[in-house]
Amino acid sequence: MKQITSPSAPMVYAADLSSGLETEALFGEDITICDDSHADWVHIRLETDQYLAWIQRQHLGALPTPTHRICTIRALITRGRDIKTPTMGYLPLAARVHVIEQSERVAKIALGQDQTGYIPSDHIKPLDDFCADWVATAEQLIGVPYRWGGRDSMGMDCSALVQLAMASGGMESPRNSGDQEKTLGETLPPDADLMRGDLIFWRGHIGIMQDHRRLIHANAWHHMVMSEHLDTAIQRIKANNGGDVTRLARL
């Protein structure tokens, strides 16, 4: 099994970047190769959520078994322990890393091909150390640009926001909002008293309740992850042909 060795890598519908972004694979995630017959492209299954799509071969490689995950929206990698040393790039929220050694302040991580780098220790958590309040992860992402198919802090869509936030709390989620609506949580009645962490579904859209009245969602209207009053979102989405709320759910 191979891993993703780029911070994030586009997964597309066909073996052509112009074919449309389906989702993104993140550093350290496992993939299974389904079709290896193209020179520069590989058809893969992303083991995190079983998503099938094409990816450029350059994003694949071999990494040591991950021990930790990135728990901030973006962790900068430096060449040395000192924060004054040049940066090598970044790793996004939920990327999986192998920690070689760690002090209170900094962790040395494996980057593949015998390369190593350093990231702040408080930007990682052991893989099995989950957040009790997973909605706080969604709150961290407020202001991140909206991007169809995106799945990292450079841009994400509504279902990726939910998937990444839930993962920080140790919960699995499908990648697409339609599958999320079919599988996540217990359905609530339309007049339910909502609470933090409840999920709100529209046709092709999903959001997370921040409290009993505010909604966090990645949306194309604001072009970002946004917190707003639920009633405001409901009215605007309906006025712009997004329809009515189709389901309320509690995890």
Image (cartoon, grey):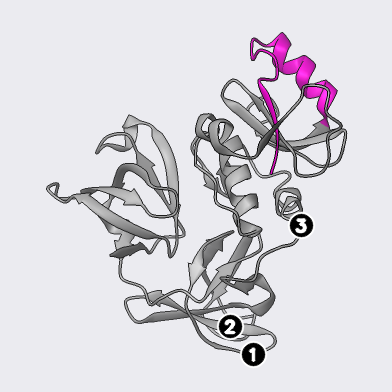
User: Amino acid type of disc 3?
Assistant: Asp
Name the residue beneath numbered marker 1. Answer: 103
* For residue 101, above or below residue 172: below
Q: Alpha-carbon neighbours of circle 1 within 10 Å: few (<14), some, or many (≥20)?
A: few
Element type where label 1 sits in the image: loop
Q: CA distance from mark 3 to mark 2?
A: 25 Å
Name the residue beneath numbered marker 3. Answer: 133
User: Amino acid type of disc 1?
Assistant: Ser
Q: Residue 176 appears at what percent x and percent y?
A: 50, 35
Check if residue 233 falls in the magenta segment.
yes
User: Amino acid type of disc 2?
Assistant: Ala
Write the start and end of the magenta stretch as one range: 229-251
Q: Is residue 244 left or right of residue 164?
A: right
Name the residue beneath numbered marker 2. Answer: 107
Q: Alpha-carbon neighbours of circle 2 within 10 Å: few (<14), some, or many (≥20)?
A: many
Outermost residue toward the left in this view: 37
Q: Residue at x 64, y 15 (%)?
A: 242
The reply to whether discs 1 and 2 touch (Cβ–Cβ < 8 Å) is: yes
